[in-house]
């Protein structure tokens, strides 16, 4: 019904092919007739309705595909960042473990040295 009330060719609108304007003239009174959803869905499905539905599905699928591709790209970038951070973290942990072992060895050596030192005489008070 809407297509009958506008001067634009529905074939051009749906597919981008053919002439944009229809040859058939429309009356000014019917040009801006508004049709609600209930009016549109009443009755049997027409070829136009099927083409419109197929076009909408195609557009939606294109949009969903682009959204998916963007999200996939973001996820790939995040996986790479996570991998790099895990590698850096692993390197830092290894460095800290080596540092702890080195400090523990140093403490043990200092303890051995301090045990070998003679004890200073203790002062006694009278």
Image (cartoon, rainbow, N blue to C red):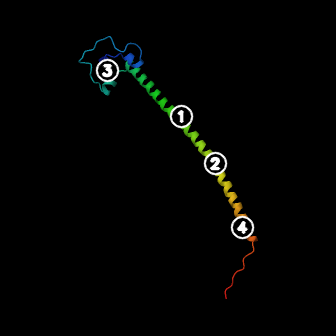
How much space separates mark 3 and mark 2, taking CA atoms?
65 Å
Q: Which of 84 and 48 is in front in this view?
A: 84
How much space separates mark 4 and mark 1, taking CA atoms?
57 Å
For residue 24, what is the image quadrant? top left
In the image: residue 117, left or right of residue 54: right
Above-or-below relation of 108 to 63: below
Could you tell me residue 85's position as x and y percent? Answer: 59, 45
> Are there few (<14), some (14-19), or many (20+) residues within 10 Å of tag 1?
few
State which tag comes first along the sequence, 3 or 1.
Answer: 3
Residue at 66 percent across and 52 percent down: it is 95
How much space separates mark 4 and mark 2, taking CA atoms?
31 Å
State which tag comes first along the sequence, 4 or 1.
Answer: 1
Residue at 27 percent across and 19 percent down: it is 31
Residue at 58 percent across and 39 percent down: it is 80
> Are there few (<14), some (14-19), or many (20+) residues within 10 Å of tag 4?
few
Secondary-structure class at tag 3:
loop
Could you tell me residue 11's position as x and y percent? Answer: 39, 16
User: In the rendered image, which residue does mark 3 sit on?
Assistant: 2
State which tag comes first along the sequence, 1 or 2.
Answer: 1
Residue with the most extreme left position:
29
- Quadrant in the picture for the N terminus: top left
* Contact flag, marks 4 and 3 (Cβ < 8 Å): no
Could you tell me residue 63's position as x and y percent? Answer: 45, 29
Q: Which of 1 and 76 is in front in this view?
A: 76
**Looking at the image, is mark 4 or mark 2 nearer the viewer?**
4
User: In the rendered image, which residue does mark 4 sit on?
Assistant: 111
> Are there few (<14), some (14-19), or many (20+) residues within 10 Å of tag 2?
few
For residue 42, what is the image quadrant? top left
**Looking at the image, is mark 4 or mark 3 nearer the viewer?**
4
For residue 50, what is the image quadrant? top left
User: In the rendered image, which residue does mark 2 sit on?
Assistant: 90
User: In the rendered image, which residue does mark 1 sit on?
Assistant: 73
């Amino acid at each position: 019904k809407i297509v009958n009330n506008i001067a634009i060719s529905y074939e051009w609108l749906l597919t981008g092919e053919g002439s944009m304007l229809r040859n058939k003239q429309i009356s000014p009174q019917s040009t801006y007739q508004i049709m609600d959803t209930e009016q549109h869905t009443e009755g049997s499905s027409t070829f136009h309705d099927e083409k419109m539905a197929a076009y909408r599905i195609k557009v939606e699928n294109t949009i969903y595909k682009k959204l998916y591709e963007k999200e996939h790209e973001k996820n790939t970038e995040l996986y790479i960042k996570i991998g790099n951070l895990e590698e850096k973290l692993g390197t830092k942990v290894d460095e800290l473990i080596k540092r702890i072992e080195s400090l523990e060895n140093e403490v043990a050596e200092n303890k051995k040295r301090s045990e070998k030192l003679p004890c200073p005489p203790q002062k006694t008070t009278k």
